[in-house]
């Protein structure tokens, strides 16, 4: 097997390998770098990842590797330091990083001194501070002070490149990640480096807005605070927020993300790398889809439009359901809700002798692309379909309601009125039980019982994306009241425990009075006196994974942080 | 005099300037289009033609405001941002309107030690402008440039990306300005190789104006 | 280790040297004159003679020990052998580097003005040797007049059938395209020249891969300087052996010396390599202007380390001798400076050049060049400190060998060596040192 020596440690490898830098990063050997990004070409322009590279010296005649008196291989090092990002790995390579080489340490320090001479010292007001590669690496590998005694170059500041991205060209270190993103990844070609020498900076050409649907990715890949979010600027410091790994729900791609929370409000959403789903990227829609978690939330359950307790809500719902014939009830599952919640709804329907729930399709033809935005604007239509739910047909559904065939409509986390499945008129005389996320839900005014539902950032559950990838979500923020399952998950999902009840900065502001479907649906069932044995989401998935071939293997531990690819429905494994 | 070291400020080009040229003006003639097609065919991908097309556009429109750069990009078939990045990288492309005649005075290296700055300052006082400025009548723009590769004929200047005027003295500068004011272009002069002077008795080319290098070298009065 | 110069010219009987790159022929730049002088015959022979297979042409160039005339002095024939074996499906390119932008260098322009067909013929032979079907001549944009001249002559060459498809009825086809630059020193660096040809911002590329592996548009490419290619027809006509006997043994051939600065007869001169610098100044270029004393010589363009008058004694113009003398051959563009030259001001202008011309791609060069100019500028104005000199040298060390291309080295060397070799002049311009104790020392003196 081929081998490579890094700081005297030998690593074996087989087959094609990424660059030396990536090889090291994959093995948790830190090498400072700025311009390198695994998804893009490596121009090696930041010059930060310099290392010493050597090869065993071979005898010119015999071709044998030469050894010294002590039997060690004689290594011939390149006279110059090489950038590890552009270096290919070959058998026998010997590498010295900053861990073992003064030369490398010195070079990295020198380079950081250069990077900082024209970089403003505005970390205290910079959004990037706290998670800034330049700041971190300057602390770790940089010089102690600066010997630069001249005016720093002034460049354009707070320039709105487009509706969502703001440029501070003085902070830019010209790594070209942003321009490479627009030319190699999104291919919008909206950015270029302009001017030359120390005067250069990234920019749109005149008359062009940087408004592509993926523009905000440049904010994450910017290794300094040169590109910041118009939406998020100056809202919070990174250390004031907790981040929770989860997925976004604006469409059926299920892009992986982090939800950033401060004081129980989601303030921003950033991508989380998942090579099977969204790779490194996240669409702008996904990033800006957070206000509905914070605002427009219902104050609590209602009965006949009046505020009520959860118990009264469950009791009234049970009363309604218990007094009609099962075939005069219609259950609507939801492509917005988790597999678990939909599953419990199906169990409730089954126990009441009602047909399996249907669900509303949220397809907006033409709204998606062939990348991370799908025409389907809901996250879990696949999950519904895998549970055997069928799509509710507006042409049939409204007339059925209007025709008096249905007395009770039970809606899980959706809005049949605003989606056009039925009209307000159609619901005249129908008792509506509604689990809803937002006050602006247009079915809410017609609801006999409304039960506020926990959103994706407040619950535990499973979503299946358009490609059959099953992924878990975790609570990023707490809800009002105590729930052992949520409390445990919130503690687990956030390494820092920031903002959790276990954190000393925990505060009770902005807690929403809502319940996950896996609490409220069994709440109704219990009030009906029905037995619903499995109500813990983890147990539900364990059960589904072993009993329903459409979810085969989809246990919480199997899904982990990155999800699993389910087999096609009907496909035998 | 603009000194980036003293005043290191990078000004941003206007993001949404009003177009200088109307859509009717922003077209290449059929002949120009044929030329562009030929250039495009000379490279494995059309991208290679952009520099030539930018040159063509600059000759046609005088300078390269954003709408002209966009026109070149569309004509070549490459992203506008790429063309804009290229146009701002190279110093000979005029992103802003210049005077009718641009005087690029070399002050670099050999020209510096042979009086390039003397010529630059002489032109400043003669034209009543500072380097980087344009005369009120719009006739002359004065620029300080890097080595133009005519070091043996220092000091020298280039007129509007074209003609080299070499071995400058105050008198030759005066004559040049007169010529340009009269609307004439200075003639191409071939600087005679010293060895040709000895072996051929003068310039080897019979088709151009010959020019015997002055001697000895001028003394530079100013070095900045 | 410094080798004491022998003090002997290696250029032999240079006074009777017969010029070959620029032979004394009236109107040689015209195709008909060039042909009448035997021009393109070598190329015809290469196409029609069984002896001149493409490998044989390369072999002859290797025999000649021709070294690149663009600055780096890399053996030309060896470079050609780096091209991968011909694959009909993979295009390959030649690029003639006529971006001549190194301050102090003006020989290629003269060659293109006076003997363009020699360059064309060299390009054709190189294409033939490497089975290349497209050659680009990258000419700096400032040479607009010379581009016009060359394009006119090139049209004639096309009409004559020396370029194009099935040249002179043979199997061999090649096109020559003149590419006009637009003002960027960096384009003379071969990898950024390739980016520029591709219609991009001219950023140098990381090497490896080298152009022969992955060049223009990712295809195998060889890049040679104008003068280098102009030597090729001569080598084939008179033999590699002949060429290798001219001038300095390890760096042979005729070479164009571009002499500028404070001499009486500046200009481009063709002589063998290995000329004594003193001969070039005194006997070739007519001596120092106004009888002034020599102060310094920059032997091969602005990035080659400056030599003091004392250092040039017995030094000849060839790579090895100049290296041992503490400088480089570079492009052979020599700047001669007399005793009145303000070396601090001169260095400031050189640092300004590199600051202005840095492409801005990679850190040490983008940031370092400006820092250098800042400090030297401060010293020139009398505001510098003695410690600035050490800082300058330190910054040079931080730039050298740390960047994608050699521009940072080219910017650092003049600073490093000018300070080393003219330190007193810099110190005299500085304020007294702020290092504690240093002022006391001065008082004692």
Image (cartoon, rainbow, N blue to C red):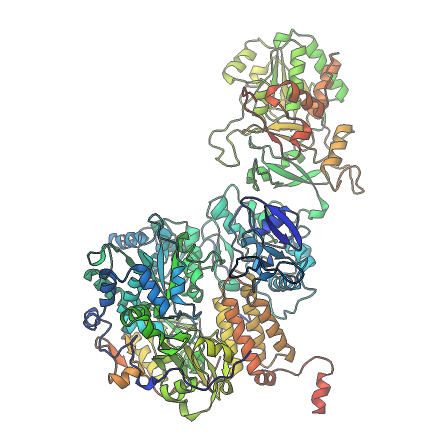
**Residue C115 visible in the snapshot:** yes
Q: Position of residue C422 (x, y in %)?
A: 55, 83
Count of marks overlaid on the render: 0
Say whether residue B167 is visible.
no
Q: Is residue C39 left or right of residue C436?
A: left
Q: Residue furthest front?
A: A62
User: Which quarter of the figure has residue A471?
Assistant: top right
Quadrant of the rendered structure where residue C281 is? bottom left
Above or below for C42 versus C325: above
In the depicted view, which residue is nearer to us: C134 or B148? C134
Relative to C192, is A241 above or below? above
Q: Nearer the viewer, residue A443 or A198?
A: A198
In this rendering, the answer to whether B208 lies above or below A540 is below
Q: Is residue C300 left or right of residue A567?
A: left
Residue C115 on image: x %, y %: 27, 72
Q: Residue at x 23, y 69 (%)?
A: C39
Q: Residue at x 48, y 47 (%)?
A: A184
Taking A155 as reference, is B192 above or below it? below
Residue furthest to the bottom: C291
Please tell me which residue lies in front, A17 or A177. A17
Q: Position of residue C207 (x, y in %)?
A: 49, 58
Image coordinates for residue B167, horizontal then vertical, percent: 35, 81
Tell which of A509 and C443 is nearer to you.
Answer: C443
Measuring 59% from the left and 38% from the top, which residue is drawn there? Answer: A274
The residue furthest top is A325
**In this picture, residue B170 sits left or right of residue B185:** right
């Amino acid at each position: 097997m081929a081998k490579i020596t890094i700081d005297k440690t030998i690593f074996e490898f087989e087959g094609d390998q990424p660059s030396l830098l990536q090889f090291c990063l994959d093995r948790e050997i830190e090498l400072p770098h700025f311009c390198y990004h695994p998804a893009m070409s490596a121009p090696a322009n930041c010059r930060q990842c310099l290392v010493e590279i050597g090869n065993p010296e071979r005898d010119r005649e015999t071709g044998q590797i030469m050894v010294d008196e002590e039997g060690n291989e004689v290594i011939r090092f390149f006279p110059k330091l090489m950038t590890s990002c552009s270096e290919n790995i070959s058998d026998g390579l010997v590498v010295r990083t900053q861990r073992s080489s003064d030369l490398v340490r010195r070079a990295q320090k020198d380079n950081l001194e250069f990077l900082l001479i024209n970089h403003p010292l505005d970390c205290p007001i910079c959004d990037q501070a706290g998670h800034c590669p330049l700041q971190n690496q300057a602390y770790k590998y940089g010089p102690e002070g600066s010997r630069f005694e001249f005016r720093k170059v002034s460049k354009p500041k707070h320039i709105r490149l487009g509706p969502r991205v703001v440029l501070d060209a003085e902070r830019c270190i010209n790594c070209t990640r942003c321009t490479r993103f627009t030319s190699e990844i999104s291919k919008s070609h909206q950015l270029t480096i302009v001017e030359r020498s120390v005067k250069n900076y990234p920019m749109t050409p005149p008359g062009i807005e940087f408004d592509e649907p993926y523009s905000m990715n440049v904010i994450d890949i910017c290794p300094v605070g040169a590109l910041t979010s118009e939406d998020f600027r100056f809202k919070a410091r990174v250390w004031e927020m907790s981040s929770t790994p989860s997925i976004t729900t604006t469409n059926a791609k299920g892009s992986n993300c982090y939800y950033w929370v401060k004081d129980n409000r989601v303030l921003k959403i950033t991508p989380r790398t998942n090579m099977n789903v969204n790779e490194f990227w996240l669409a702008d829609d996904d990033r800006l889809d957070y206000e509905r978690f914070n605002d427009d939330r219902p104050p609590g359950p209602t009965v006949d439009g009046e505020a009520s307790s959860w118990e009264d809500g469950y009791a009234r719902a049970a009363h309604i359901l218990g007094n009609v014939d099962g075939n005069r009830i219609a259950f609507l599952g939801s492509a917005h809700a988790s597999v678990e919640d939909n599953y419990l709804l199906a169990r409730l329907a089954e126990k009441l002798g009602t047909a399996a729930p249907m669900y509303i399709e949220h397809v907006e033809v033409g709204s998606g692309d062939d990348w991370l935005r799908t025409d389907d604007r809901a996250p879990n239509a696949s999950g519904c379909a895998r549970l055997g739910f069928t799509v509710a047909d507006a042409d049939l559904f409204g007339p059925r309601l209007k025709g008096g065939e249905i007395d009770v409509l039970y809606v899980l986390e959706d809005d049949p009125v605003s989606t056009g499945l039925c009209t307000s008129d159609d619901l005249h005389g129908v008792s509506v039980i509604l689990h809803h996320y937002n006050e602006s839900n247009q079915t809410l005014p017609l609801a006999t019982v409304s039960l506020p539902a926990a959103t994706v950032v407040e619950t535990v559950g499973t979503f299946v994306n358009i490609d059959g990838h099953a992924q878990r979500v975790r609570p990023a923020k707490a809800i009002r009241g105590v729930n052992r399952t949520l409390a445990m998950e919130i503690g687990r999902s956030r390494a820092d425990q920031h903002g959790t009840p276990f954190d000393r900065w925990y505060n009770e502001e902005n807690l929403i009075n809502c319940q996950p479907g896996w609490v409220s649906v069994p709440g109704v069932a219990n009030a009906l006196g029905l037995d619903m044995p499995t109500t813990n989401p983890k147990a539900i998935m364990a059960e589904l994974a072993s009993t329903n071939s459409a979810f085969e293997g989809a246990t919480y531990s199997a899904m982990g942080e990155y999800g699993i690819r389910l087999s096609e429905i009907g496909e035998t494994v | 005099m603009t000194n980036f070291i003293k005043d290191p400020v990078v000004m941003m080009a206007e993001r949404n300037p009003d177009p200088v040229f109307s859509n009717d003006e922003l077209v290449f003639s059929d002949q120009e289009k044929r030329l562009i097609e030929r250039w495009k065919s000379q490279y494995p991908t059309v991208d290679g033609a952009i520099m030539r097309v930018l040159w063509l556009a600059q000759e046609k429109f005088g300078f390269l405001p954003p709408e002209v750069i966009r026109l070149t990009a569309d004509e070549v078939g490459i992203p506008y941002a790429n063309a804009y990045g290229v146009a701002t990288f190279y110093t000979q492309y005029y992103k802003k309107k210049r005077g009718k005649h641009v005087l690029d005075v070399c002050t670099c290296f050999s020209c510096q030690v042979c009086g390039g700055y003397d010529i630059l300052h002489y032109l400043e006082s003669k034209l009543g402008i500072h380097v980087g400025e344009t005369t009120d009548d719009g006739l002359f723009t004065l620029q300080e440039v890097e080595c133009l590769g005519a070091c043996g004929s220092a000091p020298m200047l280039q007129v509007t990306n074209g003609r080299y005027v070499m071995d400058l003295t105050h008198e030759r500068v005066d004559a040049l300005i007169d010529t340009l004011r009269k609307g004439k272009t200075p003639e191409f002069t071939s600087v005679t190789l010293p060895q040709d002077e000895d072996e051929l008795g003068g310039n080897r080319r019979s088709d151009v104006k010959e020019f015997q290098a002055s001697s000895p070298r001028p003394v530079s009065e100013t070095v900045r | 280790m410094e080798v004491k110069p022998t003090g002997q010219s290696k250029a032999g009987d240079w006074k009777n040297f017969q010029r070959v790159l620029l032979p004394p022929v009236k109107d040689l730049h015209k195709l008909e004159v060039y042909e009448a002088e035997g021009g393109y015959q070598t190329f015809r022979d290469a196409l029609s003679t069984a002896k001149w297979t493409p490998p044989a042409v390369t072999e002859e160039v290797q025999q000649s020990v021709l070294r690149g005339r663009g600055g780096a002095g890399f053996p030309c024939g060896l470079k050609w052998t780096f091209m991968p074996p011909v694959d009909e499906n993979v295009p390959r390119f030649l690029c003639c580097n006529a971006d001549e932008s190194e301050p102090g260098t003006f020989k290629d322009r003269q060659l293109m003005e006076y003997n363009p067909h020699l360059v064309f013929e060299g390009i054709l032979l190189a294409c033939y040797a490497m089975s290349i079907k497209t050659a680009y001549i990258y000419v700096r944009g400032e040479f607009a007049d010379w581009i016009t001249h060359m394009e006119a002559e090139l049209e004639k060459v096309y009409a004559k059938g020396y370029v194009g498809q099935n040249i002179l009825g043979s199997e061999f086809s090649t096109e020559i395209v003149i590419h006009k630059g637009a003002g960027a020193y960096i384009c003379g660096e071969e990898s950024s020249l390739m980016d520029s040809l591709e219609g991009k911002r001219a950023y140098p590329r990381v090497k490896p891969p080298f152009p022969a592996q992955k060049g223009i548009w990712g295809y195998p490419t060889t890049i040679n300087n104008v003068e280098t290619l102009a030597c090729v027809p001569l080598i084939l006509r008179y033999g590699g052996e002949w060429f290798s006997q001219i001038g300095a043994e390890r760096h042979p051939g005729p070479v164009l010396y571009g002499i500028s600065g404070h001499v009486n007869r500046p200009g481009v001169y063709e002589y063998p390599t290995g000329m004594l610098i003193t001969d070039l100044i005194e006997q070739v270029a007519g001596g120092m202007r106004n009888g002034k004393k020599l102060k310094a010589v920059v032997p091969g363009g602005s990035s080659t380390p400056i030599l003091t008058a004392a250092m040039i004694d017995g030094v000849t113009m060839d790579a090895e001798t100049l290296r041992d003398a503490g400088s480089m051959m570079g492009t052979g563009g020599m700047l001669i400076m007399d005793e009145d030259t303000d070396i601090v001001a001169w260095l400031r202008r050189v640092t300004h050049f590199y600051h202005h011309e840095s492409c801005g791609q990679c850190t040490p060069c983008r940031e370092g060049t400006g820092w250098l100019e800042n400090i030297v500028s401060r010293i020139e104005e009398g505001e510098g400190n003695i410690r600035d000199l050490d800082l300058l040298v330190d910054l040079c060390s931080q730039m050298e060998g740390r960047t994608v291309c050699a521009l940072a080295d080219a910017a650092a060397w003049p600073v490093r060596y000018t300070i080393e070799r003219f330190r007193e002049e810099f110190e005299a311009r500085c304020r007294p040192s702020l290092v504690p104790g240093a002022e006391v020392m001065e008082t004692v003196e």
